[in-house]
Amino acid sequence: MRVLVAPASFKECLSAAEAARALAEGVRRAGAEAVLLPLADGGRGTADCVVLALGGRTVAVRVTGPLGESVAAALGLVDAGRTAVLEMASASGLALVPRERRDALHATTRGTGELLRAALDAGAQKIFLGIGDSATSDGGAGAAQALGFRLLDAGGRPIGPGAAGLETLARIDPGGKDPRLAQTEVVVACDVDNPLLGPRGAARIFSPQKGAGPAEVERIEAALARLAEIVRRDLGVDVLGLAGGGAAGGLGAGAVAFLGARLMPGAEWVMDVLAIDARLHEVDLVLTAEGRFDAQSLGGKAPMALARRARAAGVPCAVIPGSLGPGYEPALAQGVTAIFPLVRENVTLREAMAEAPALLAARAEEAVRRCAAGAGPDRGDARSR
């Protein structure tokens, strides 16, 4: 039996490559052959995944981190430098901020704008930007400032960082915009399809995991609504209703407004680059994985996108998530044939994170044996949900 091992990363725990190696160990213990293919969907690991597939190179660039500190971000260059592959996670990502310092109101995307500017300096004519795993909720305002846009308050002064700065936004002056952007194609890979505002928007769905309490969530919602209104008035771009506009704290919408970017599902783009459809015809089973499998997984995340392609190819697909959350059930009718969560009756979330490689190997071995025997879905214990 040949098994395609294609996990996404486990946030704050394992990279996609690390998860793939752990899963492959279990596949081999079950007597099967493992074909490793780590996945990304615009978030952490996207640049490495694509650069490796296309034979490019990655260089480190010093940029402003989410809370104003200097960080080393990854700039991927392929096609002899004509195409740049970036991930905002390396410049403005959640992994760069310790849990106790998360600040959804003040975290900035300025470093992502600086990384984009570095790509322009390197001569890139096309930029692919992955925008998953962000620490920010500023609608791309910081990135726009780094690229020459002036975001001003009522007194004509530059606004401060983050969503808090947007609360004083009165005018956008695009006169200083980097002129190279007009000659550069920017494609943005979104790991979710959420809109900018509303019940499924950037503030209400994603800002709590970035440190926002209930009152801050509503402040961020109002700040992003203010940004959208002024963007429409001053730039002539309507970002409301964009699928993916709420990705990365509204950076999806900001990329369209400030960069003229085209949004697309990141997982689909990466899988096309990796020629995943051809690989599916060469295997008997697919194993994929991510940190949490829930309703959000169905909205553009890599494991679910892979499961749908596996179904079209007639190949069974098992998911091994760290834990299960509400709303995962429709996946069982959309390509997922079995689910083997790490968090179960006798394994807590803390234990799963601490022992993730060993548990992934054990669950992969179990998944291969059960799927080979034709067993039905294993959805884990109720406490894993």
Image (cartoon, rainbow, N blue to C red):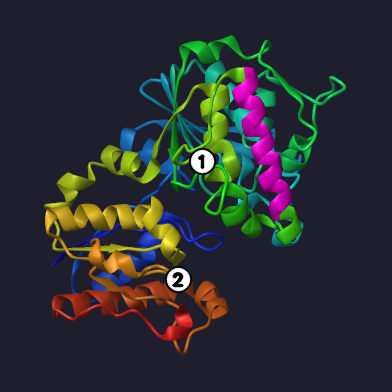
Label 2 crowding class (10 Å Cα cut-off): few <14, some 14-19, many 20+?
A: few
Assess whether residue 112 is covered by the magenta stretch: no
Regarding residue 157, the answer to whether it shows in the image is yes
Closest to the observer: 16 or 345? 345
Q: Where does the magenta region start and end? A: 217-234
Q: Marks 2 and 1, how far apart in space? A: 24 Å
User: x%, y% of residue 281?
Assistant: 12, 52
Residue at the spot 12% in from the left edge and 59% down from the top edge: 314
Q: Which residue is mark 1?
A: 131
**Quarter in which the N terminus is drawn:** bottom left
Residue 147 placement: quadrant: top right
User: x%, y% of residue 156?
Assistant: 84, 19
Residue at the spot 31% in from the left edge and 66% down from the top edge: 330
Q: Nearer the viewer, mark 2 or mark 1?
A: 2
Q: Secondary structure at mark 1?
A: loop
Label 1 crowding class (10 Å Cα cut-off): few <14, some 14-19, many 20+?
A: many
Assess whether residue 233 is covered by the magenta stretch: yes
Residue at the spot 26% in from the left edge and 76% down from the top edge: 367
**What label does residue 260 carry, if any?**
none
Q: Which residue is mark 2?
A: 326
Which label's residue is closer to the chain start, 2 or 1? 1
Q: Please identify the residue farthest to the right as the structure is shown.
A: 155
Regarding residue 62, the answer to whether it shows in the image is no
Mark 1 residue type: Ile
Image position of 334 (left or right of 196):
left
User: x%, y% of residue 15?
Assistant: 47, 56
Q: Secondary structure at mark 2?
A: loop
Mark 2 residue type: Pro
Residue 153 placement: quadrant: top right
